[in-house]
Image (cartoon, helix red, strand yellow):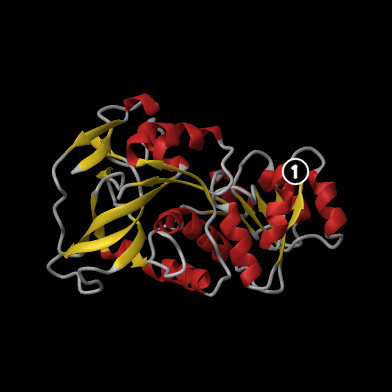
Amino acid sequence: MRAITANRYGGPEVLELTETDDPKIAPDAVLLRVKAVGVNPVDWKIVAGHLDPIMHVHFPLIPGWDVSGVVEAVGLDATEFSVGDEVCGYVRKDEVQHGTFAELVAAPVRTLAPKPASLTWQQAAGLPLAGLTAHQSLARIGVTGGDTVLVHAAAGGVGVFAVQIAVARGARVIGTASERNHEFLRSLGAEPVVYGEGLADRVRALAPGGITAAVDYVGGDAVEVSQRLLTDPSRVASIVAPSVTGRGGHHVWVRPSSADLADLGRLADTGALTVTIDTALPLAEAAEAFRLSAAGRARGKIVLDVA
């Protein structure tokens, strides 16, 4: 099969399109014929070596955790899916080597859910990691319909999902973004504010009584600003600042969850959630996708077409 591989840590230049062996299928896994894969910041961070302190990484490495595709074969005890099923998944395994940037992927059933019928292959590939991150961070702080939620980096890959999920739950959403993304956020149901110096005052102008929950997808002083605005300072979750736990908040590292991914699929199929594709490239241009992701200017998802 064709796959994107890296034989050492480095930047986009270490990625190569190669021919490699088809994956073996564990008893609790299925073999997917890949249609598209999502590109996330964690992918280029792994290739750059940033996750080496916390995860075992083996070479040659096929990067990628997001996927959409068709079940081509099933493992000995993978009864959840059948050949021909259309699925998507956040295929993070305990060790990093056999990722999704390939024509075939062996995926544990615990990482998969049915592909939402309303989404294209590209959109389904862009949903899992970012959508689950948003879903689980909002769940960690118990966001409900009575909340006023501040979403930092609301127009980014995770933020756009958090906005839509919180709105679907009936919450009021205030989202930080550059001015060029304000109309986009309004179309998702959020009230946009410009990030940067003076953010707390701008949020107070919109919500004089303060906010009741906050999610941080950007870092910097987002947690500190959020806690100045929160009625309960513990109701802040961050995916980029582990130090938030020392301030009484929550640090979230997204976990594979078939149930949570199925919830996102139901939201998509009811029209409450959509997946915005910023850029779609062929698999062979994975290096360019890494460069675009690292630049941090994408509005929505970057994906690679495989089949």
- Occupied quadrant, residue 162: bottom right
Judged left or right of residue 31, residue 50 is right
Closer-to-camera residue (119/287) = 119
Judged left or right of residue 217, residue 285 is left
Query: Where residue 204 appears, x then y in whole percent?
Result: 84, 54
Figure quadrant of the N terminus: top left
Q: Residues within 10 Å of mark 1 (few under 14, many from 20)?
A: few
Closer-to-camera residue (286/74) = 286
Judge whether 167 appears above or below 174 on screen: below
Judged left or right of residue 239, residue 68 is left
Q: Secondary structure at mark 1?
A: helix
Closer-to-camera residue (151/84) = 84
Judge whether 245 appears above or below 285 on screen: below
Query: Where residue 43 appears, x then y in whole percent?
Result: 40, 40
Q: Which residue is mark 1?
A: 179
Residue placed at 15% from the left, 47% from the top? 22
Q: Is residue 58 visible?
A: no
Query: Where residue 31 appears, x then y in whole percent?
Result: 20, 58
Judged left or right of residue 125, residue 169 is right
Q: Is residue 88 visible?
A: yes
Residue placed at 31% from the left, 58% from the top? 69
Q: Amino acid at mark 1?
A: Glu
Residue placed at 35% from the left, 45% from the top? 64
Query: Where residue 2 appears, x then y in whole percent?
Result: 22, 41
Judge whether 58 appears above or below 177 on screen: above
